[in-house]
Amino acid sequence: MITEERLKILTESAKYDVSCSSSGSARKNEGGMGNGYVAGCCHSFTPDGRCISLLKILLSNDCIYNCKYCPNRLDADVPRATATPEEICELTIDFYKRNYIEGLFLSSAVCKNPDYTMERLLLTVKKLRLEYNFHGYIHLKGIPKADPLLMKEAGRYADRMSYNIELPSEKSLKLLAPQKSKESLLLPMKTLAMQTAQFREEKKKGLIKGHFLPAGQTTQMIIGASPEADGQILRLTQALYQKNGLRRVYYSSYVPIVHDSLLPDTAVGQLREHRLYQADWLLRFYGFSVEELLSENENLATEFDPKCAWALKNMQLFPVEINRAPLEMLLRVPGIGSKNAYKIMEARKYTKLSFEDLVKMRIALKRARHFITCNGKFFGEKNEYSVRGLLAAAETGENAKQLDLFSILSSPQNAMIALSGQL
Amino acid sequence: MVYIFDGTKLGFLTAFLLAYEDGNALLTSHAVQLPLGESFISVTTDSDKAKRVERRLLTFDTDALHALDRLLRSGMENHEQIAFRYFKKLATEKRPIDKNFADPDVFAAVECMKKVGHEIHKMHGFVRFMELENGALYAPISPDNDICDLLLPHFRARLPEYPFVIHDVTRKKAAVYDGKNAFVAPLGTADVLISADEEGWQKLWKNYYKAVNIPSRERLKQMRGYMPVRYWKFLPEKQETPNSFE
Ligand code: SF4
């Protein structure tokens, strides 16, 4: 059993990675323990409101690199710890058996060199799969600059892998993470995408069995440690989804803990992070392209969510008739999410929906009413300026509490690092 | 008229037939406070009649029995009445109505079923097994809805080599997997002997829970929203350790 002390160090160094999702894998139980759960599953929630799905831990926090923003960097004076592959396997198995977790999210600081680190990670994951017969979820963080053959092997055992972009531009990387480059981070993603395609091809032909990253790849960016605008960040996001087939891009708002003249002293409010996630959803599930939402040097509006902001710029398209509008258009109505769009599509097959029907279906109309008609009747505000005012007011009401919280977060004495502590 | 039945599927269907024409029918299996001047019938389950109703409902909607099962499992006070109104509507419309969300009876039934479904998903995460001396796993639960047997397939598929018991301590019954077969059995109280390592792992888990939290980002309301306090009783990570310094 791993000691409490080392578990603490290795967990605390891992916890700033925002990803904890266990979705996307349908891996079957083939004897032994565990299987995948396509929808993902949360096992607990911590007082910070986050879900615990995977055992999120570092194999080691002992780093040879010196990324300016990272608490585990070479120069930092922090307690160091390293776990053995056996300790990680045992921990995973015994936590999983008790249904504490859905699987393992394993990462590491760079010890000795990238290949050595990747080998240790791979060794752990292989042990877990082959010796411990574990079929639960495994998310493995990739180490940039490690041998592509190691990556390829890792892909056979992990459900998901991620290389974190960390900073959204080459310039910022040079400045803040001198041992990394955009190329060294993007290249492994491309390589993995190619290896995945190749595997699928061979599997189709019956040449090979098993899995290769069934839950794909994800990445994470730190927001606000460097000067990039939301428009630039979301363009990168869109390219990652479209060109590299990534499943998710995570955003982590910057809070200063490491003091360095190159880093800003102020934290980024979580509102910006929230807006980026909203825009990200629009790209993935609502059929929007980033070009429709904002230009490259622009930031997302703070006073409205990105869909409202888009609709206000495109008032000529509204109002839409709730009983006739195609799904694509319903999805573009501010305040109507995908679940409610589906409900409307189904319910209108039975009856012509009135405004009261929508209320009965508990569809939130605070925003939507300015953009729809029900059987030709309009229930919103006609004047565009009033609409703006009402939408902004709706937003402040909801975010007032949270904003209060953001201000607490941003005060220096409470500031803790909100960055990923590792690669 | 109030129709009191035994809470079973066949009982419900018998009562359904009796109450169908009654505009003021109230179906229930609980002891209820009778409204003033209201009388009641205690329904005797008639499985022949019930099966006839069942076949009839199935001709209107092939999913009808699944819906009935979910509705009868619900822990909502008036779930049987919600089911009655839903099936009455189905019998009147004579075609699937489950997506007619603008209808209040359908909406109530759909929401009620959704709650049951959501709790099954939640319990997939919140069940906490402890390891017993003999290697079997034991988890006490106390869900809102009567679902312990519906948790069996999930855990059986992922822990095929471990016998386990999921014990609904409120309803005094248990879903059991003995390593080969799965079944449901009545179970009042269980005396369990935990394994030598069990406490150590629980302690490690509690430490992990503490370490992975980011205290400066406290959002308790959100935590409670996702993981309501009534589920904490059987979560080791939510039990205070009295002698701990942390
Ligand atoms: S971010 Fe990763 S590579 Fe950079 S110092 Fe931290 S642990 Fe090392």
Image: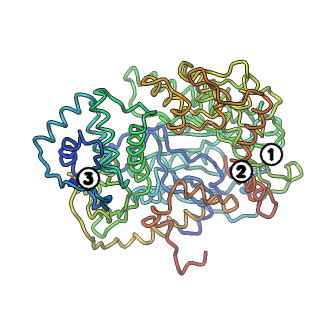
Q: Secondary structure at mark 3?
A: strand
> Mark 2 sits on what residue?
A419
> Could you tell me how far apart the alpha carbons at marks 2 and 3 are, in whole angstroms?
61 Å
Mark 2 neighbour class, 10 Å CA radius: few under 14, some 14 to 19, many 20 or more: many
What percent of the width, then of the height, locates residue A407?
78, 56
Q: Quadrant of residue B225?
A: bottom right
> Circle 2 marks a residue in which chain?
A
Horizontal arrangement in the rendering, residue B30 relative to residue A285 (left or right)? left
Mark 2 in CB contact with mark 3 (< 8 angstroms): no
Mark carried by residue B2: 3
Q: Which residue is mark 1?
A: A225
Residue, x 28% and y 27% (percent of image)?
Answer: B94
Is residue A374 placed above or below A221 in the rendered structure? above
- Which kind of residue does numbered mark 2 sit on? Leu
Point 45% across, 61% down: residue: B231
Q: Report in which chain the residue with disc 1 lies.
A: A
